[in-house]
Amino acid sequence: MNRPDDYLNADYSVSSWLLTTDHKRIAILYLLSITLFFFVGGAAAVLFRLELMTPPGDLVGPETYNKLFTMHGVVMVFLFLIPSIPAVLGNFLLPMMIGARDLAFPKLNLLSWYLFILGSAVATTAILMGGLDTGWTFYTPYSTMFAHTNVVTGVLGVFIVGFSSILTGLNFIVTTHKMRAPGLTWFRLPLFVWALYATSLIQVLATPVLGITLLLLVAERGLGIGIFDPAIGGDPLLFQHLFWFYSHPAVYIMILPGMGVVSEIITCFSRKRIFGYPFIAFSSLAIAALGFLVWGHHMFVSGQSAYAGMVFSILSFLVAIPSAIKVFNWTATLYRGSISWQTPMLYALGFIGLFTLGGMTGLVLATLAVDIHVHDTYFVVAHFHYIMVGGMVMAYLGGIHFWWPKMTGKLYSEWWGRVSAAVIFIGFNLTFFPQFVLGYLGMPRRYHAYPDEFQVLNVLSTAGASILGAGYLLPFVYLLLSLKYGRDAGRNPWQATGLEWRTPSPPPTENFARVPEVREEAYAYGAEEAP
Amino acid sequence: MPTQAPLFPEQASTMAGRIDALFFALLGVAGFFTALIFGLILVFAIRYRRRPGRSSVFRTREPLWMELTWTAVPLAIAVGIFIWGAALYVEAARPPAGALQVFVVGKQWMWKIQHPEGPREINELHVPVGRPIRLTLASEDVIHSFYVPAFRMKQDAVPGRTTVAWFEATRPGVHRLFCAEYCGAGHSAMTGRVVVMEPREYERWLEGGGRGETIEASGRRLAERLGCLTCHVPGGGDRGPDLVGLFGKEVRLRDGTARIADEAYVRESILDPAAKITAGYEPLMPTYQGQIGEEDMLRILAWLKSLNEQKPEFRSQKPE
């Protein structure tokens, strides 16, 4: 039985949820909304993967196909991945991890969710009105002067959602600075908090540029003010510079929090303190900083100067180094640990493997001469799915499985959990590995129909996608079932360190009856078992 | 063109093998590190799996040399690959002198190609083997990208500017041409073929394909029709600067600055003449925005460049 005074039982009325300022309830609101969008974006992917089973475009027309991949991209990036770990797990855990009763600005936090809902409602309206067909990158002048679809509505939706992201980032930064429990110094913080902090910096500094860029796009499309279209005095490359100035850092918004989750899980399930804490912590900041300086690697064949290409290439290689440091430190953490193969750990290990492959293929794309060939092919598609799906979604699911007992007070079926991790790992690789080969063969992305010689690999990819889809449905089912049939989790089912585990599951509204005091570094694993 | 289900693309240009060599080096690096990480994870996860009576060794202090090693080694590899990739890229960005010129205009949803000798093609490009081909690309509407996988060559065609790419085919054959930048409903239909021919066969194709008016000649005819030469009198007049020998030269402007008369400058001067005025002239010229399409622009540019090559003829009139 749930304790009567936990945050879920505090009040059952609808208004107590819709007007809540409790960070845990807001996290649940986000969890419900982004889960919906994950399945919406996934449904679009199912349709176009089916279309790509055969070379000619026969299942849907080209306009529909273009709307499907646009919808998939926009929904997955802006309505799922960017809010995923920060807005759900970050919201739920940040205050508890630092021994606080809530975020610094609880009402602002609720406003963030409402902005997210408003923006996603506007974007959904654009889809219901017939959709848009610009791709999630909205490249000009196609998006401003040539597309006949609901570009302005869709873009305004993304614009509004951006403010939700900015406010969440701001809230997290202030909370981390001002609300830490007594004794919790920066170098005692869990690495998840470091990762969220670095992510928040990017959200606050980069997202306004996206907002400005999208407004300029609307100004050109709606009012005919020449900014990006050369026919009315604009410059199409200006859009790419502005767009990627946000959207490359946004890639790190989508991966840094996942790295934070993995740091937590790896150390807990190895029962060992993390290897190289300061290196992992500072590499998050290094990624956040360097991530701002690499946007031009999306433009190696755009006609930008060869010198600019060289600068962006070397900087892109540099940003890979902090990621490599993290991977090595996680691996070293396993050394002489006491490793349990429970569900969150399987997801975290899957993350490390897939992220490594995604990162290494990123080097291929950073290499100037090779990028000329693979740019805008399926090689790129495979690469960023290894990072965003193989990396971020695995980490997100790992985090959900790790903290589910804390959020709900219930244990899920461990057996089904392991099965889901394995099915998703296999399905993912079968879906996206063939796309590396397709890309090097030269199949361009966003093709509705393709030459016959690409069919075998496309069929493999679609087969993998069906396994992957089934894999994603599994946790949805057994996690929901655990709410009714799951055993009570207790305070700390994983014997994890960290302040969030010192409070009951589910936690009371105020998190801690008494603000805890911190006397030791994070991840003091093994101390309790030491002779 | 391949018909089976290949796993690796054909190598049909001078760059293809060299780019593949770099790619294989990258695959080697990627394979090594991926295998290393996967291998270590598996070994550790099995060897140190949780067993009763055995706890972790929790107080290992991480040695600094380890952190430094796994920072420095990847860094060194990265810098090495960067240099290799950048050197090839610079080569790929600079067409060799004496390359055969071909003009390409992308529009929704076709590739229009013009050879300097006159023939025009749509979605097909015929080139001779063993000769560098310099492509000058433009777009009439949105961004497109000219991509021939067998040549490992790709370049965006961007509206409002011209871009350049080059390749040299190494053996006769037919290769796929794709548009690689999403450009709307017909994007995946904006494909074609590149036909590489023996030089003699290519000559024959040129003859048969209507070697007629050269691109320079049609550019000159266009310039006359548009009245360019009324003001830009050969030898230089009061109303407009001389166009002979202008291309590639430094131009002094009224505001005291100087500009190289490259393709971007000429394009701007035609579409927005008031933007930059040559020193000593008045802003008299009307705009040609909306009157000249991208193909015409490429013709004018080709003609303008050809005026430079005529210079020796003027010189030859002087006593030897």
Image (cartoon, coloured by chain):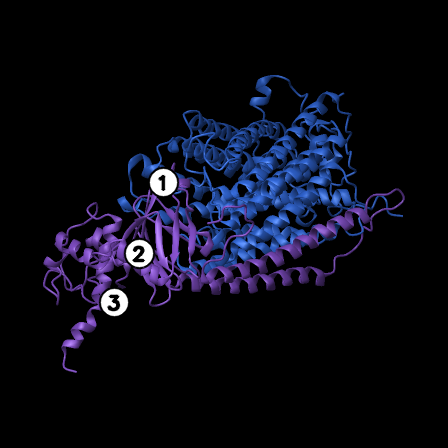
- Please tell me which residue is depicted at 69% across the width and 27% down the height of the picture: A479
Q: In which quarter of the image is the N terminus of chain A?
A: top right
Q: Which chain appears blue?
A: A
Amino acid type of the residue tagged 3 in the rendering:
Lys
Q: Is residue A204 left or right of residue A474?
A: left
Q: Are marks 1 and 2 on the same chain?
A: no
Residue assigned mark 2: B205
Subunit bearing disc 3: B
Task: Judge whether B184 appears above or below B151 on screen.
Answer: above
Helix, strand or loop for disc 2: helix
Subunit bearing disc 1: A
Subunit bearing disc 2: B
- Indicate which disc residue B249 carries: 3
- Please tell me which residue is depicted at 45% across the width and 58% down the height of the picture: A309
Q: How far apart are marks 1 and 2 (CA)?
A: 36 Å
* Camera-nearest label, 2 or 3: 2
Q: Position of residue B44 (x, y in %)?
A: 78, 50
Q: Position of residue A341 (x, y in %)?
A: 77, 40
Q: Distance between the residues labelled 3 and 1?
A: 35 Å
Q: Do labels 2 and 3 share a chain?
A: yes
Residue assigned mark 1: A142
Q: Colour of chain B?
A: purple
Helix, strand or loop for disc 3: loop
Amino acid type of the residue tagged 2 in the rendering:
Trp
Q: Can residue B30 be seen in this view?
A: yes
